[in-house]
Image (cartoon, rainbow, N blue to C red):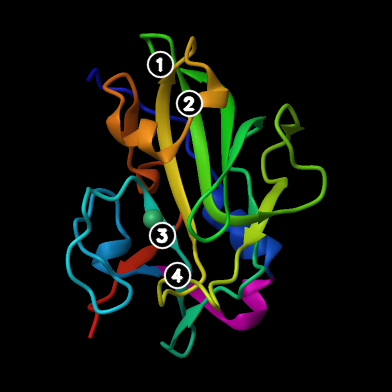
Amino acid sequence: MTPYTLPASRFCELVVNHNNLSEQGFLQWAFYPGMLFQSMERWWDNGGCRDKPHEGIDLCLYIDQSGSTRGLDKAARIPGMYQGCVKNIIDDYIGKTIFMAHDIYNDTVKQLYSIYGHVELLGRIESGVILEEGEIVGSIAGTEGKRLKILPHVHISVALIPESFPAEQLSWKIMNESLDIILLNPLDIFNGNYTILQQT
Ligand SMILES: [Zn+2]
């Protein structure tokens, strides 16, 4: 893989703004180790091991001014991280996953995608829709009544995908198995402070 620097995204700041987190005393984002990119740990249910490395990050926890750990509400609004086009929407085990392509390419003509998992669609979101940076792609899906005991969260992946790849075929299985798709660490492109929590 050639060294490649992506333009920074204001995503974390946009999530704070869209959900009035400053009024909740937002200080910084927080992650359990199992929420991080390529982690093999499960942070839900009773822990244990994932069956494959985590394809992105799970965003929901933050620390407030008093030092308390808080979670984003179910239905928190999730913005797109750059201007782009919705290319595909599939079901996942909690809600929907939205694949969004951006006019950002690396030197081997792979296109940058941002992927938002475990959301519900809001407004006019469907394949083909163009969104400005920060426009809302969806809201965090509820997890009550689901198979897994897990906090509502948005899963974020960032990937370089060949421009020629048929977007309507994108799925989590393809993301994990295709040798042509390069997963990147979303935290490398987000401006924003975060801390790693020890899970008890
Ligand atoms: Zn995840």
| Cβ atoms at labels 1 and 2 below 8 Å apart | yes
Residue hosting label 3:
58
Q: Is residue 168 above or below residue 173?
A: above
Question: Could you tell which of marks 4 and 3 lies nearer the N-terminus?
Answer: 4
Type of amino acid under label 4: Gln
* Magenta-span inclusion, residue 17: no
Question: Could you tell which of marks 1 and 3 lies nearer the N-terminus?
Answer: 3
Type of amino acid under label 1: Asn
Q: What is the CA distance from the residue labelled 4 to the residue labelled 3?
A: 15 Å
Q: Nearer the viewer, residue 69 or 22?
A: 69
Q: Residue at x 62, y 82 (%)?
A: 24
Q: Is residue 36 above or below residue 170?
A: below
Question: Could you tell which of marks 3 and 2 lies nearer the N-terminus?
Answer: 3
Residue hosting label 1:
106
Q: Is residue 48 above or below residue 154?
A: below
* Magenta-span inclusion, residue 22: yes
Q: Position of residue 74 (x, y in %)?
A: 61, 73
Q: Position of residue 57 (x, y in %)?
A: 38, 54
| Cβ atoms at labels 1 and 4 below 8 Å apart | no
Residue hosting label 4:
28
Which class describes the residues within 10 Å of circle 4: few (<14), some (14-19), or many (20+)?
some
| Cβ atoms at labels 3 and 2 below 8 Å apart | no
Of tags 1 and 4, the one toward the viewer is 1
Indicate yes or no: mark 3 CB to ligand 1 under 8 Å: yes
- Quarter assignment of residue 59: bottom left
Type of amino acid under label 2: Leu
Q: Position of residue 126 (x, y in %)?
A: 74, 37
